[in-house]
Amino acid sequence: MLNQVYLSLGSNIGDRMQHLQRAVEMLQLRPENQLLAISPVFETEPVGGVQQRSFYNIALKLTTSLNAADLLKYLHVIERSLRRQRLIHWGPRTIDLDILYFNNEEYRSATLKIPHPEIKNRRFVIEPLLTIVTEDDFHQRLTDLLATTPDHNWLKIIREKEDVNPWIR
Ligand SMILES: Nc1ncnc2c1ncn2[C@@H]1O[C@H](COP(=O)(O)OP(=O)(O)OP(=O)(O)O)[C@@H](O)[C@H]1O
Ligand SMILES: Nc1nc2c(c(=O)[nH]1)N=C(CO)CN2
């Protein structure tokens, strides 16, 4: 079965664009995954109170035949390969990959929460998502979230939306 998935990626250590690029390439390396859309790259103010450098964030849409648990495992492989260290909760990271939505399914285990519970509190997630969601009802729900989110941190587009191909070469 093909699952439709939305992911959020963020980086704020080292070459942030390169880390996003590598993570996207690694996602596409798995034959189970097919990237469908990638948002513009947003530079975003850090959310969560930790003093740190700004982030580069993107959202992407893919189909995958992996189940949610196996997809999460693979996201951790990518994080490890980009030398992500978990030092500070909500602190700096070379790369962070979160599953935002997985079909219309809900998961509430200790290791996997879908839809991601922080979406409504993160403009850096909602705004990129809005650029790649095409279904009218879904787009409207995200527009409503954007209108009511308590997150008023700044963000700006630093690389316009492109086709998937330039990302995966
Ligand atoms: N939807 C999800 N996507 C990715 N990880 C998730 C999800 N739900 C739960 N997790 C769990 O969250 C754990 C910790 O994630 P991480 O260290 O990236 O947290 P964080 O980035 O500091 O905070 P946040 O999860 O709010 O972005 C992961 O090991 C994973 O098991
Ligand atoms: N702007 C921004 N802020 C964050 C981000 C992020 O990706 N972008 N990730 C965090 C931990 O998941 C904490 N804060």
Image (cartoon, rainbow, N blue to C red):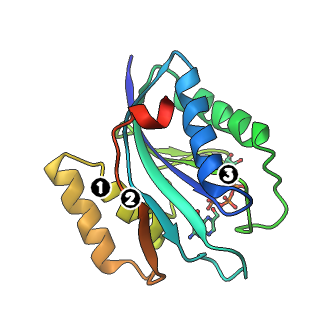
Looking at the image, do the residues carrying marks 1 and 3 touch, with CB atoms under 8 Å apart?
Answer: no
Up the image or down, 71 lies above or below 82; here it is above
Residue under label 1: 131
In the drawing, does residue 67 fall left or right of residue 1? right
Q: Amino acid at mark 3?
A: Ile
Number of numbered tags placed on the structure image: 3
Q: Residue at x 57, y 32 (%)?
A: 25
Name the residue type under label 1: Thr
Residue drawn at the location 67% of the way across and 63% of the way down: 12
Disc 2 to disc 1, C-alpha distance: 5 Å
Instruction: Name the residue located 52 percent from the left edge and 59 percent from the top edge.
Output: 57
Instruction: Give percent across and percent down for residue 152.
Output: 44, 84
- Whether label 2 lies within 8 Å of ligand 2 gets the answer no
Splitting the image into 4 quarters, where does residue 149 fall?
Answer: bottom left
Task: Give the SS element for disc 2.
Answer: helix
Upstream in sequence: badge 1 or badge 3: 3
Q: Residues within 10 Å of mark 1 (few under 14, many from 20)?
A: some
Say which residue label 3 marks: 95
Task: State the CA–CA distance, disc 2 to disc 3.
Answer: 17 Å
Q: Residues within 10 Å of mark 2 (few under 14, many from 20)?
A: many
Q: Assign a secondary structure to mark 3.
A: loop
Residue appearing at x 60%, y 75% in the figure: 46
Which residue position holds label 2? 128
User: Is 112 or 39 nearer to us in this picture?
Assistant: 39
Q: Secondary structure at mark 1?
A: loop
Q: Residue 120: in sight, yes or no? A: no
For marks 2 and 3 on the same chain, the one whose residue lies earlier in the sequence: 3
Amino acid type of the residue tagged 2 in the rendering: Pro
Up-down relation of residue 6 to residue 41 (above or below): above
| Marks 2 and 1 close (CB-CB < 8 Å) | yes
